[in-house]
Image: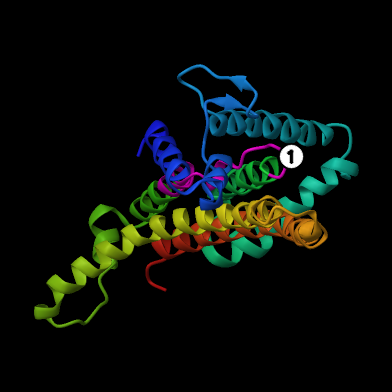
Amino acid sequence: MALAEVKEVAEHVAEKHGDSGGSWIIHHILDSDTFFGLFPLPDYLTNHVMFMLIASVLLIFALSRAASSYKKSFVPTGFTNLIEIFIVFIRDEVVKPTIGKGYEKFLPFLLTIFFFILTVNFLGLIPNGSTATGNIAVTSGLALISFFMIQAAGIKKNGLLGYFKGLIPHGIPAFVLPVMIVVELLGLLTKPFALAIRLFANMTAGHVIILSLIGLIFILKTVLVSPVSVGFALFIYLLEILVAFIQAYIFTILSSLFIGMAVHQEH
């Protein structure tokens, strides 16, 4: 559904049910054609696209700076030390255990996925910011990239026929084979679907809860609930910082796990 069509639906809900229908929350979590809700954007750009571009620029600058610091000293300090902590964690606790032998070839891709999702998630926590990972189109794009990487890794290691042959369990009766082929093909397709929906749902849910809690003040039309609403909203906001890390970690570890399963089918 196009952005304009979604907005029309939201406006229809607002006209029918009023603000109490929660349509104002939809406007806050949807993509828009204005940057930070203030500056109009060209037709080929949206708010979520702008935040992804900002995330990309920030990552290029930050990681380039961290890499250049090693020219001065091999002992990381300050910001470079922080970046190295994340890199070592993803390498030793995520990629190496799930992929095993040959994990080095996939480490740059998985680190890119992790840092990009993490940065986009954090940008969404800025007041009046926008969480691009709360857009199903964005998470689907990330999931498709991982999907193609998984298939490419499996085919390169096992060959085209060998890879797809390895998807079918050994020793199954011939009459079950047609069913198993369908099941395994569906299994391949559900992996990117799970990646996309998990990230989208978790990042959207937190913002909806925060907006709903703040909205209680206006829905009930009394400031008496404001201490409770603001207090709980602040708690969920702090929890969202943790969720930003967790969702980047989960997307990365699942992608790494699927790559490991595709490469080492014998396991």
Residue 231 in the image: state x and y as whole percent.
Answer: 81, 60
Main SS of residues in magenta: helix
> Of the residues shown, which amino acid type is indicated by label 1?
Pro
Q: Name above or below for residue 142 compared with residue 150.
A: above
Quadrant of res 232: bottom right
Residue 174 in the image: state x and y as whole percent.
Answer: 10, 79
Kindly identify the residue that appears in the image at 43 percent across and 60 percent down.
194
Residue 112 in the image: state x and y as whole percent.
Answer: 60, 43
Kindly identify the residue that appears in the image at 26 percent across and 60 percent down.
164
Quadrant of res 68: top right
Left or right of residue 79: residue 192: left
Does the rendering let one see residue 102? no
Say which residue label 1 marks: 127
Tell me which segment is drawn in magenta.
125-144
| Callout 1: SS | loop
Left or right of residue 72: residue 122: left
